Amino acid sequence: MGPLVVVSQLATGLGVLAGAMLVKSAMERPMAGPGGWQPPRCATCNGTGRVACLCARWSDGDVGCRTCAGSGRMACSSCGGSGTGRPIPVQLNLRSNRPP
């Protein structure tokens, strides 16, 4: 093996090592920690994703239906049970002021 092959293999090995260290440092940092971006909490369920089921509101003490599976809590209709706000789809109609 000539000196050029050894140098080439050493450079390749150092490149792989540097890439592994870069990936490791990126994985250790939290994506959205205490100071990072957090999705907004749902105002209806306060971020829990569950609200009181309708069967618990109008029943005579017995709680349970298919929606809540007997727990008395159903998925929030505002956030879909995720606990975070959902973006509202908006359609924008743009008109051009230029003549055709």
Image (spheres, rainbow, N blue to C red):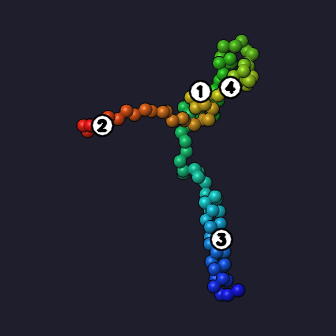
Question: Could one spot residue 59 in this view of the protein?
Answer: yes
Q: CA distance from mark 2 to mark 3?
A: 54 Å
Badge 1 is on which residue?
77
Which circle's residue, 1 or 3, is located before the other in the chain?
A: 3
Look at label 3 and name its amino acid.
Leu
Q: CA distance from mark 1 to mark 4?
A: 12 Å
Q: CA distance from mark 1 to mark 3?
A: 49 Å
Give how far across and how far down residue 19 sits, in percent. 62, 67
Q: Is residue 38 above or below residue 20?
A: above
In front here: 72 or 97? 97
Look at label 4 and name its amino acid.
Arg
Q: Is residue 2 above or below residue 44?
A: below
Which circle's residue, 2 or 4, is located before the other in the chain?
A: 4
Which circle's residue, 4 or 3, is located before the other in the chain?
A: 3
Q: Residues within 10 Å of mark 4 (few under 14, many from 20)?
A: some
Look at label 1 and name its amino acid.
Ser
Task: Residue at 63% x, 80% y: name it.
Answer: 8
Which circle's residue, 1 or 2, is located before the other in the chain?
A: 1
Q: Nearer the viewer, mark 2 or mark 3?
A: 2
Q: Which mark is residue 96?
A: 2
Q: Nearer the viewer, mark 1 or mark 2?
A: 2
Q: CA distance from mark 1 to mark 2?
A: 38 Å
Q: Quadrant of residue 65?
A: top right
Give how far across and how far down residue 81 sits, in percent. 63, 32
Q: Which element type, helix, strand or loop, lies under badge 3?
A: helix
Task: Residue at 64% x, 75% y: name it.
Answer: 12
Q: Which mark is residue 22?
A: none
Badge 4 is on which residue?
73
Q: Which element type, helix, strand or loop, lies under badge 2?
A: loop
Look at label 2 and name its amino acid.
Ser
